[in-house]
Image (cartoon, rainbow, N blue to C red):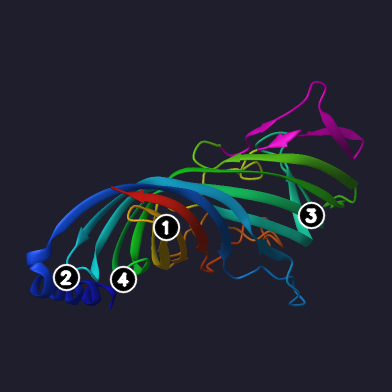
Amino acid sequence: MMRKFFQLFMIVCFASGAHAQDFSFGIKAGMNLNTFKGGAEADDAGNAVESYSNGSGFHVGATFSWEATELMGLRGEFVFSQKGGDRSFDGPSYYILRPTSDHPIYATGTRKAELSVTNSYLELPVMGYFRPLPWLEIQAGGSAGFLISSTGFGDISFDGTTSNGSPISLRHELDVHYFTDKPGEATFINPPSTVQVSGENIPYPQTAGAFFEFAEDRGNLYKIMELSAMAGISVYLNKGLYLSLRANYGLTDVTKTKADVSLVKLDDTHQFISRSDKDTNVSLQASVGFSF
């Protein structure tokens, strides 16, 4: 549907305004208000234990415009844009201690976690625009984004009981780098913080990476490419300077199923349960720009 729209739009532009062709370029920058939209995980009773909230970021880039007529044209952009959001978990869960790779210790209990995720994209939006008034512009189109950085920070606390009946309670920070973190990656203080399991002091991290509880590489959590639809308005303060507000709505799932695992429970063999829900980016972008 979107492809047919652009084909029709370009035909109209060529037919009605070939005599008024005009190319220009510009720059823009601004702030993003971001969140994830997806299925929140629930406990066995159906109560939601996961939630998403707004995070912030910024964008900056270049714009390239083709004016077909005085009323309409096409615009392409090359933009660095930060997306993501805050993810919270509060409910029944598990925790995996790995003093050695061959002998993990499994615990069940209650997990509370907060993680603020920043995913940085190079975006290539293509939009048609319409100017009903000389100072007002309406835009709509689509964008392809390519993930170049994926990080997050937060903390986690866990209270529960190990499979052999030892009570444990721990808290540590999260400093995640989804592109580079390895399974089991974490930072320990010296001497490390420990919990006692069957009379033995078992260390737990001061700061854990993205895949600390993983025993094997399940791939990056976030996909490299996303597609989105966008629409917005711009108000021109003079011929070149403008203020813009744009909504960016993700169309594709940004998470990989294998790495997107349940935090509520493991299966009967203590293996991760993959989640197949669709997670998308939603952003509201406020910009100031100048067209030359």
- The answer to the question of whether label 3 and label 1 lie on touching residues, with beta carbons closer than 8 A, is no
Q: CA distance from mark 4 to mark 3?
A: 50 Å
- The answer to the question of whether label 4 and label 1 lie on touching residues, with beta carbons closer than 8 A, is no
Q: Is residue 278 visible?
A: yes
The mark closer to the camera, 3 or 2, is 2
- Upstream in sequence: badge 4 or badge 1: 4
Secondary structure of residue under mark 4: strand
Residue tagged 3: 112
Secondary structure of residue under mark 1: loop
Q: Which residue is at 31% across, 48% downward?
A: 26
Residue extending farthest to the front is: 238
Q: Position of residue 239 (x, y in %)?
A: 32, 56
Compared to 202, does 69 lie above or below?
below
- Give the residues drawn in magenta, as a range: 182-208
Compared to 208, does 91 lie above or below?
below
Q: Position of residue 111 (x, y in %)?
A: 79, 55
Q: Which residue is at 69% across, 34% downward?
A: 100
Is residue 90 shown left or right of residue 28? Answer: right
Kindly identify which numbered label has been placed on residue 131: 4
Q: Position of residue 32 (x, y in %)?
A: 53, 54
Which part of the image, by quadrant, shows the N terminus? bottom left
